[in-house]
Amino acid sequence: MSQFKINDELIDRIKKLILSEDKSKVIEKLKDVHYADLAEIFELLEISEVVYIIKIFDKQKSADALAELDEDIREGIIENLSEKEIAEKIEELDSDDATDIISELTEERQERVFSQIKDSSLAEDIKELLKYGENTAGGLMAKELVKVNENLSISKCLDEIRKQAKNVSRVHSIYVVDSGNKLKGRLSLKDLVTAKARTRVKDIYIPNVDYVHVNLEGEEVAKVMSKYDLEAIPVVNNRKILLGRITIDDIVDLIKDEADKDYQLAAGISSEVEANDSIFQL
């Protein structure tokens, strides 16, 4: 797989296009760039230049790039966007990434942004996630997931999955719940596609499913996911009510952030710490 190359020549070209206010050429230059590469480009531009791109560029991709940025860089950009513009970006994101951005605002500005969010369900999800500690399972999870009731027939189950999957960026697992939203297990794709239409979900689901408590520390979540090689893990409360899910992407971001913090801390107390050392361990 070829990687997109970011160099001085590219950055200079983008800067010149922005300076000339040639919107169409800026868009053309960046339209095929992955959002992770776009975030890296943002880091090499002036804040005013990034804001210019965000205002004219694809909403989804610029929102994803914004979520990818380090908090200190993103803060300066957000300060230069209106509440309406912030809301528009947030509506393109999963609830966990949206919450990360909202949490960086003052309470007063949060309320103004919430008033601009058209998706009331997303707004409620964000408000719920804001209640949890930043580095807990609750603070890491997204509300978006696919779940089905154990009493559904396979035919109805497939209809429900199709409907829910439209709002989930990646479907890692299909969770099974009872009528009270208590986590019961998960469905395997093989069992789902080979089962007869009238078969009930409760007759084929896998009852053994790894999960974490909403208040579990992020480092412990990372250990569980690493140990069992999980791409995603459901999050529950004391009554085992399904609240959300954490994906491997969230854990990678957590490990990176914690490693950076640990190194900075260690660098201040010991000259023997190597650049690739980290106190955070799985």
Image (spheres, helix red, strand yellow):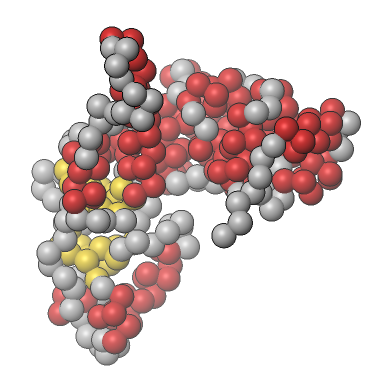
The residue positioned 31% from the left and 28% from the top of the image is 277
> Is 79 or 91 nearer to us in this picture?
79
> Is 242 or 4 nearer to us in this picture?
4
Left or right: where does residue 19 sit relative to residue 195? right
The residue positioned 19% from the left and 51% from the top of the image is 227
In the image, residue 245 lies at what x, y percent? 30, 50
In the image, residue 140 lies at what x, y percent? 32, 39
Left or right: where does residue 78 sit relative to residue 103? right
In the image, residue 163 lies at what x, y percent? 43, 67
> Is 174 or 117 nearer to us in this picture?
174
**In the rendered image of this protein, does residue 166 appear above or below residue 264?**
below
**In the rendered image of this protein, does residue 276 appear above or below residue 183?**
above
The residue positioned 25% from the left and 56% from the top of the image is 229
The residue positioned 22% from the left and 66% from the top of the image is 186
| Rendering quarter of residue 230 | bottom left
* Residue at the far front in the pictured view: 272
Q: Quadrant of the C terminus?
A: top left
Q: Is residue 180 visible in this depiction of the protein? A: no
Q: Is residue 25 visible in this depiction of the protein? A: yes
Q: Quadrant of the N terminus?
A: bottom right
